[in-house]
Each structure stands twice: as structure tokens, then as C-alpha cells.
Image (tube, rainbow, N blue to C red):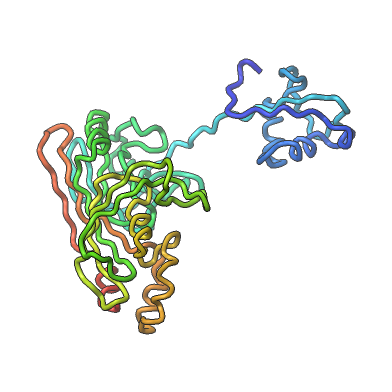
Amino acid sequence: MNDKSCETTYTVHVPENKAGMRLDKLLTEETDGLSRARIKSLMEEGYVFAGEFGGENVSDGAKKACLGDVFVICVPPAVPAEPEPQDIPLDIIYEDDDVIVIDKPPGLVVHPAAGNADGTLVNALLHHCKGSLSGIGGVARPGIVHRLDKGTGGLMVAAKNDAAHDGLSKQFADHSLDRAYYALVWGVPKPLEGEIEGNIGRSPQNRKKMAVVDRGGKYALTRYKVLKVLGTVASLVECRLATGRTHQIRVHMTSIGHPLIGDPVYGGGGKSRRGQLSDDAKALIDSLDHQALYAFELGFNHPIKQTRLVNKLKIPQYIKDLCSCL
């Protein structure tokens, strides 16, 4: 087993009550998270061994397990698939030999991941840039310096070479970029302009969500300003990031009682205000399959030319339509 690279290993001792059971079935029951199909695949690929410290390969899943037998299962590290170029239209705001700035539409995933093997921004960039992308992000994320959530639209910058990637990464690390978003939120924040400060980490109640946490997490600061009050039911807010944490604006606005309209993860707090809406407004919000959040400003120092680039976009039509309806 010494020549095998293992991300996880399992050592299975055959218990008395399972002696005589098919080996692939027993190994499935005695390991956490490995399906029977996965066990069979590992056997065929030579990752299951007889003996406590590894020995001969075991490839016969139909073999009967004997009391006292010991098996070692080696689970190799996942090898990321190399994304293929795909001719997906891009709304390019700025481009030169070093960087490319695009307006990412809501619904477009930034890079391949579980459940989204292709059809991503990376696939589109590989096609458009003809392979001229920074390799620092790895095989699955060439050129990607930062990301927007799938449902968040707006400005993103990608690096076309390693020098540009390094220069942009430093600016994201020291928070020297200008990043501003339009956010349509439930209710009217008070005061109308202020700061939201609070460490963001995994929610203790739901590990799939982020939250403002009392212990741990990472420091986060969002500056906000109400741009338009829509009665008492909603507001159009400008949010500026002083830091860049996962789901920062969505979590911070929720933490002060004003979740984003349409947010499938954090937007539950707006349900009480639906009763104040017209049928048309309800229908429009129900048709929205993502949070009403749009990155309209992105300013940074060009990583090679050292000139300041500031990109700004207008309010997207879908947010205008929501504001009119509300």
C-alpha cells in the first residue's frame, strides 16, 4: 500500500455477527460514507487490502468475510476534472492582455464543482481567452481570483497570467479594492446609513449556512446606505465591502433584520411582510430564483500597469422592475 496516495483510510475488523457476509456488503456497512458501488470501484482499482497494515489486494467483492479478517481501504484524493472550453456568451466590460472584467449574470456558476461540472464562467473564459488564463487557481479554477455566489450577478475580474493573478490576489487580501453592491432588502434599515460589524463563520445551528458568530469566524465589515425607501416593505440599499467573507452582505443584512429579497438561504425573515404586497409584486418575487444582489462597482489597481481601473454598472432591469412593483 506504500505506493498508494490515500486521503482517507479505513481499517475494518470482521465482527462475529457478520462472518460469512459478502465482503463488499460488509465493507459498505462498516465504513462511513462509502457506497457499495464505491467499494466495488476501489476494489477494482486496487485500493482494498487484506491485513491490518495492508497486504495483498482484494478485488473479489463476492468473497465471504471470515471472523477475525482485517481489511484496509484506501480512499485516494479526488482528482479535479479539467474543465473544457465552452462557447458561453460573456458580457465583457474591460479586457487587455492581463485581466478581463465581466458582468456575470445571476445563475452562472463561477467554477466547476459538485453538481456543476460544466457550463460555468471558467468554461466560458477558457473558450474566450483561448487558454490564456492564470494557472494559480489550479486546474478547476484557472484565472479565478475571487467569486460571486451563483445567484449574485455583477462585476468580476479574472487574471490572464500568473503575474496579474498575484497582483490582484494581494489587493483582495489587503482589502484595497472598491466593491459595491445593490441589495434589495425587506424593510427599512435604521439608521439609513451605517456599518455592520461582526465575525462571520459557520452557523452553529446549520453548518451549511454562514452566520454572525460570537466565537471564531473571520472579522467582517459592511458599510451600507439606503438609496430608496419602498414604503415600509422594502428598501434599495448600497452595500460596500470593507472585507470579503462568504455570503457577507447576505449574512450581515439578515443579522440586522433586513434579509435580501429572493434569498433562498437567508431570506426567510421577509415572509411576514408579504401580506403588504400586491398580487403582482408577490408573483414577481416568487418568479425570482436568486437573491436580489448585484455587484455594480469594482475598482482595483491594474496589477501590471498600476493604473486605477474603476468599473461601474447601472441598476439591472430585474431590480428596477422589483422596485417599481414594490
Residue 228, compared with residue 99, is above or below; it is below
Q: Which residue of the protein is positioned furthest toward the left in this rendering?
A: 307
Judge by depth and name the residue closer to the eye, 229 or 133: 229
Please identify the residue farthest to the top as the structure is shown: 2
Residue 313 at what x, y percent from top left?
18, 58
Task: Check the image and report above or below for 2 versus 77.
Answer: above
Q: Quadrant of the N terminus?
A: top right
Q: Residue furthest front?
A: 214
Which residue shows up at 81% across the image and 34% down it?
23
Image label count? 0
Residue drawn at the location 46% of the way across and 46% of the way down: 202
In depth, the one of 89 and 60 nearer the eye is 60
The reply, left or right, for residue 254 in relation to residue 69 is left
| On-image quarter of the C terminus | bottom left
Residue 70 screen position, x and y as percent = 79, 24
Specify whether 276 is left or right of 300: right
Looking at the picture, tell me which residue is in the foreground, 117 or 292: 292
In the picture, measured across the screen, residue 56 lies left or right of residue 77, that is right
Seen from the viewer's position, the closer of residues 292 and 57 is 292
| Residue most extreme to the bottom | 279
> Image height check: is 192 above or below 127?
below
User: What residue do we see at 27% from left, 48% from top?
Assistant: 156
Q: x, y percentage for residue 166?
A: 26, 30
Q: Position of residue 79 (x, y in %)?
A: 51, 32
Q: Quadrant of residue 181?
A: bottom left
